[in-house]
Amino acid sequence: MSDAKTKTEGAYKAGDGAYVFDVDALQGLMAGPGYAETFGPVVEGELTQVGVMTLPAGQTSEPHTHPNEQWIYVLKGELHATVDGQESDVGPGHLIYIPADTVHSVTVSPDGDCHFFTAKDLRSGIAGTKFEG
């Protein structure tokens, strides 16, 4: 891991010679402390952070927000997503867009873990804040 400062503690910093990452070899981190059991490695560039995450079967991310917009591309597994009150069933090949400061949550099918690629801008770290509304 680079000594460069990241927005997310435990994330890897891209750039300055670090341009290619073997995701399977990277150490993961908890990306939803206090609201989700989401776990995986995170890499941060200058303007964007990305992660390859896993949310276990049957788990729910509590409704939460973050100041950065987010994209989620489902690689494996099925989930039910709620973004700003709009509900959708989502599976492999589906892409979810979450605007900044928008309440959202997901529930993973009990049939298997959900693996997804996520990207956020770097206005904030990877984790959000549980919605208490």
Image: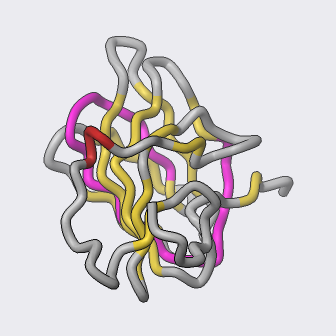
74 vs 64, left or right, is: left
- Res 27 quadrant in image: top left
- The residue lying at 33 percent from left, 16 percent from top is 112
Residue 82 vs residue 30, the one in the foreground:
30
- Can you name the residue that lies furthest to the left here? 93
In the rendered structure, the answer to whether residue 74 lies left or right of residue 58 reads left
Q: Nearer the viewer, residue 125 or 25?
A: 25
From this view, report whether residue 77 is shown above or below residue 96.
above
Residue 98 horizontal/vertical position (percent):
46, 67
In which quadrant is the N terminus drawn? bottom left
Question: Left or right: 28 with respect to 75?
Answer: right
Magenta-tinted stretch = 62-82
Question: Was residue 99 drawn as part of the magenta stretch in this picture?
Answer: no
Q: Write down the quadrant of residue 35 in the picture.
A: top right
| Residue appearing at x 85%, y 53% in the figure | 132
Question: What percent of the width, then of the height, locates residue 78?
Answer: 30, 30
**Percent from the top left, x then y, of residue 97?**
37, 67
Secondary structure, magenta segment, majority class: strand
Quarter of the rendering occupied by the C terminus: bottom right
Residue positioned most to the top: 111
Q: Who is closer to the viewer here, 122 or 110?
A: 122
Q: Is residue 6 above or below residue 89?
A: below
Above or below, 66 relative to 72: below
Residue at 36% of width from left, 58% of height from top? 118
65 drawn magenta: yes
